[in-house]
């Protein structure tokens, strides 16, 4: 009876080892960068990511101090902080990019 119990424990442990062996470890360490809105606007790719990921609705909450927008860009999480007026100016000044000629001559 002891041999049977020992064999069952060994079988369960080996099954557990095989199942854990197929799991690949993931790297969860993310780089977090805290920058101001003015600094963030100097990077064109980050501005595009901000426009895609942030909405003006996060300005409805009224914290004491600065508003913080969280954006993921190039495997880096950016915490972008600025005043309410600076964020409103950012959202209002959304410039549209066009490909090709855009001016019409009269």
Image (cartoon, rainbow, N blue to C red):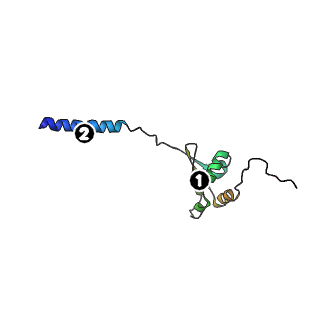
Which residue is located at x 39 percent, y 39 percent? 23
Picture coordinates of residue 35 (x, y %)?
A: 61, 48
In the image, taking residue 70 as reference, residue 29 lies left or right, namely left
Which residue is located at x 23 percent, y 36 percent? 11
* Residue nearest the observer in this picture, 28 or 16: 16
In the image, taking residue 59 as reference, residue 8 lies left or right, namely left
Q: Is residue 43 in view? A: no
Instruction: Using the image, tell me which numbered label, if any, was put on residue 53.
Output: 1
Q: CA distance from mark 2 to mark 1?
A: 47 Å
In the image, taking residue 98 as reference, residue 106 lies left or right, namely right
Picture coordinates of residue 61 (x, y %)?
A: 56, 64
Secondary structure under tag 2 reads: helix
* Residue nearest the observer in this picture, 43 or 97: 97
* Residue nearest the observer in this picture, 69 or 54: 54
Instruction: Using the image, tell me which numbered label, if any, was put on residue 75.
Output: none
Which residue is located at x 67 percent, y 51 percent? 38
Q: Nearer the observer, disc 2 or disc 1?
A: 2
Q: Is residue 46 in view? A: yes
Q: Residues within 10 Å of mark 2 (few under 14, many from 20)?
A: few
Instruction: Using the image, tell me which numbered label, if any, was put on residue 12.
Output: 2
* Residue 23 in the image: above or below residue 63: above
* Residue 99 in the image: above or below residue 86: above
Picture coordinates of residue 21 (x, y %)?
A: 35, 35
Q: Which comes sooner in the sequence, label 2 or label 1?
A: 2
């Amino acid at each position: 009876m002891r041999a049977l119990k020992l064999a069952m424990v060994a079988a369960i442990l080996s099954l557990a080892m095989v199942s854990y062996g197929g799991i690949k470890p993931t790297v969860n360490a993310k780089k977090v960068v805290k920058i101001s809105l003015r600094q963030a606007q100097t990077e064109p790719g980050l501005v595009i990511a901000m426009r895609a990921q942030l909405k003006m609705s996060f300005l409805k909450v009224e914290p004491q101090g600065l508003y913080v927008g969280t954006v993921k860009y190039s495997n880096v999480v950016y915490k972008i902080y600025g005043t309410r007026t600076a964020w409103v100016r950012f959202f209002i000044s959304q410039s549209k990019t066009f490909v090709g000629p855009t001016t019409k001559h009269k």
